[in-house]
Amino acid sequence: MQAKPQPLSARTLASWGDRLPGPAYDRDIVTPGVVHFGVGGFHRAHQAMYHDRLMNEGTAPDWGICGVGVMAADRRMQQALDAQDCLYTLVLKHSDGTYEPRVIGSIVQYLFAPDDPEAVIEKMAAESTRIVSLTVTEGGYNISDVTGEFDLSNPDVLHDLEPDAVPRTTFGLITEALRRRRKHGLAPFTVMSCDNLQGNGHLTKRVFTAFARLRERELGDWIEQEVRFPSSMVDRITPETTDADRAEVRERFGIDDRWPVVCEPYTQWVLQDAFTAGRPKYEQVGVQLVDQVEPYELMKLRLLNAS
C-alpha cells in the first residue's frame, strides 16, 4: 500500500531518503547574497537551481537567495514557500516519459514587499547583498508601447517619485536601497536581469537610470557610472504549474508540494561577466561566462530562423 503523501518541509525531507535527492548542504548556515524579484517557475527552474548546484558542491553558502514579491498575486508564492521552509520540488520531464525530481534549497527567505517594504530595502542595503536579480517579464521594465521610453503614466511609478514616498515598485525599492548604500559609502550591488529579453542588461540599466534621475539627478548619474547591469541569455522551457502537476508529484513521489516546478531537462545560461561586488562561481555549474552576450543571442536567432 502506497504511503500517504507528506507535506514538503525541512522536517519531513529526510523521510523520502534516497528516493528524493535534496540539499546535501546545511541550509542553516546558508545566508542570502542575492535578492531576487519575481520568484516564479522560471527563476526556480533556472537561477535558483544553479545556486543549489553550487551549494551541493560544498561552495557558496553565502550565495543563498532571498526572494521578493511586489505584486499582490505574489502573496500565493509567499504562502507556499513559507509553509515549506522555502523548499520546493523541481521535476525534469524527459522525452521518454520519465520524471526526475529534486528538492531545491537555495531560496532561504522570501519577503512580500507590500507587507514590509522597509525590510526589503534594508535587505538590499546590507553589505552582504551583492546581487539583485530580476525575473519580472517584459512588462516589468515599464517601457511605453507608444514612445519606447520609460513610462511616466504608470501611477505606481509616479507614486514612488513623490518625496518621502514608501516604495511600491521594483524601481522604487531597488533605487532606495542603492541610495542608502551610496550614503553609507558601500559599493553598489549588481543588478542582473534574468528575463528572456534580448539586450536585457542594457534595458535594465536604461530604465533604472531613468527612474533614479527623475528622483535625484546625482543618484541617477552615480547608478549609471557605478552599477553593473550584466546581460544574459537564458533558456529552459518551464510551463506554468497546474493542479495536474501537483497531483502528479503527489502520486509519483508521495510529495505534497504546494507549488512544484515541472520543466524540460535542457537548460542554458550565458552571462556577461560584469559584476560590481563579486559573484558565485557560476562557471563551475555550467553557466557560460562571457565578455559580450550579443554574439550568442545572434547565433540563437539565426538557428531559430533557420529551423
Image: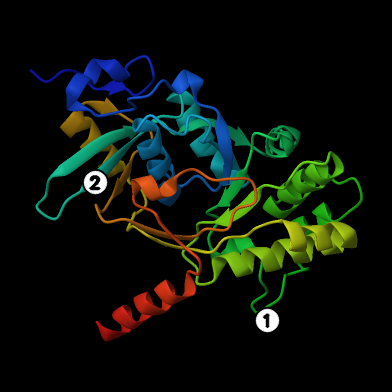
Q: CA distance from mark 2 to mark 1?
A: 40 Å
Near mark 2 (Cα within 10 A), the count class, few <14, some 14-19 or many ≥20, is some
Pinpoint residue 116: horizontal percent, then vertical percent.
71, 33
- The residue drawn where x is 68% and y is 74% is 144
On the question of residue 68 being in view, the answer is yes
**Which numbered disc covers residue 146?**
1
Per the image, the residue denoted by label 2 is 92
205 to 175, vertically: above or below:
below
Where, quadrant-wise, is the C terminus in this rendering? bottom left
**Horizontal side of residue 132 vs 176, given as left or right:** left
221 to 259, vertically: above or below:
below
- The residue drawn where x is 38% and y is 29% is 58
Depth order, front residue of 210/25? 25
71 to 107, vertically: above or below:
below
| Mark closer to the observer (2, 1) | 2
Pinpoint residue 256: horizontal percent, then vertical percent.
30, 27
